[in-house]
Amino acid sequence: MLSIIGLITILIVVVLLISGKVSPFVGLLLVPIGGAFAAGFNLEQIGEFFTSGTQSVFSVVVMFVFAIIFFGIMQDVGVFDPLINKMIALTRGNVIAVAVGTVIIAAIAQMDGSGASTFLITIPALLPLYKRLRMNPYLLLMLVGTSASIVNMVPWGGPLGRVAAVLEMDVTELWRPLIQIQLIGLVLLIVLAVALGYREKRLIAKKGLVNEESLETDDNEDSQVKKSLGNPKFYWINVVLAISVIGVLVWGIIPAGFAFMIGVGIALPINYPTVQDQMKSIQNHAPGAILMATIILAAGSFLGILNGTDMLNSIASDLVTILPAFIIPYLHIIIGVFGVPFDLLLSTDAYYFALFPVVEQIVTGFGVTSLSTAYAMIIGNIIGTFVSPLSPALWLALGLAGLEMGRHIRYSFMMMWGFSIVLLAIAIAIGVIAI
């Protein structure tokens, strides 16, 4: 009965997250409370489960709040603008270079962990180039989305924060083995961009749509991203600060939340001399930080209740008796292979807060480590983030580019899914994922 109640609870949460009828905060908070009552637990016990669950994700919440504010400030003062502008200038007029430059620009823009800001930077800057060269704008969207997804394995990106919350571990410890996957992924994506650039060049030549040599180079307005809002004389100080904070994260000498908190504390007086300006900067980025914090806290409550009531353990033990024995030890790999298709059905919250805990509970009973399960499901799924209709940032990108969701899925889905499976295979081959 406990397994049935647990499955119904998870199913309702997943359906609510997919339907968009309620916010993730509401679904993750209220539905498990109802499930716990149905299982016979009283309000005092549920309160204890809530406390345990939210305490386990507190460090993740702190990290997210200050990471979003820190990178928001870095974007505002134009830390990444010269790099992006230089890449745009270098890629003008060459189809292959534009495709490769798209990958690099998107990777730089995604360093703040926000897909929305990445699309706001890359689409307006690069779409005029694609139009002038008669390149397919759906190629732009696919390359930006895939590049951003790879970079989004950073600790301050959503997926790792969610998994760290589930596993109750430090998010930077979770991230370090994935750095090599990110680097390999970006190199492979650049190779793919070259191949797709050649294909695009042939298609353009076949149709006789454009002569690259005739592309005017003085149309700078079309290819420039937003100008820096900060003081130019402090640019290199901000660059050193951003590199230092990221370096401290990789080093792991202090908690990630503390590193970002220090970064914010240094960045504010450097760039905003008055208290009013400093508070205004925080207020500008607080909505995004608070939104993520509320979702993570609600997820902590959700997981605390599922664990406290023993629903997850019950589901896992009962599923073991149902699934064929030869499948169970490889369930995390199977889920990882189908991670991108899952993105069309499950939101990020549903995938990591509902599906992942169940899979992790099942396979750990067969000697598979929790980290291997996490990496299989992260790598298998994360590339599909920006091909899913459940991604708000993708709808923003489609609006900016004037494109259609259905055509984007048809153009990008198989390519992104195949890329995801290749990365998953590489992660297995180099030992990041154990089988």
Image: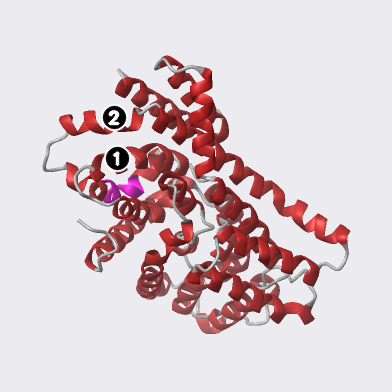
Q: Say whether marks 2 and 1 touch (CB < 8 Å).
A: yes
The residue that label 1 is drawn on is 361
Image position, residue 54 (x, y; %):
54, 39
Quarter of the image holding residue 149?
Answer: bottom left
| Residue lying at 26% horizontally and 66% vertically, measured from the top left | 426
Highlighted range, magenta:
335-341
| Residue lying at 72% horizontally and 78% vertically, measured from the top left | 235
| Residue lying at 51% horizontally and 29% vertically, measured from the top left | 48
Residue 85, numbered label? none
Please rate how many residues cluster around mark 2, counting C-alpha atoms within 10 Å: few if below 14, some from 14 to 19, many from 20.
Answer: many
Q: Is residue 21 magenta?
A: no
Task: Tell me if 413 is positioned left or right of 402 in this view.
Answer: left
Q: Amino acid at mark 1?
A: Gln
Residue 142 visible in the snapshot: no
Label 2 to label 1, Cα distance in Å?
9 Å
Image position, residue 322 (x, y; %):
17, 29
Quick one: SS at disc 1?
Answer: helix
Give the answer, above or below, for where 371 lies relative to 243.
above
The residue that label 2 is drawn on is 315
Number of labels in the image equals 2
Quick one: SS at disc 2?
Answer: helix
Q: Amino acid at mark 2?
A: Ile
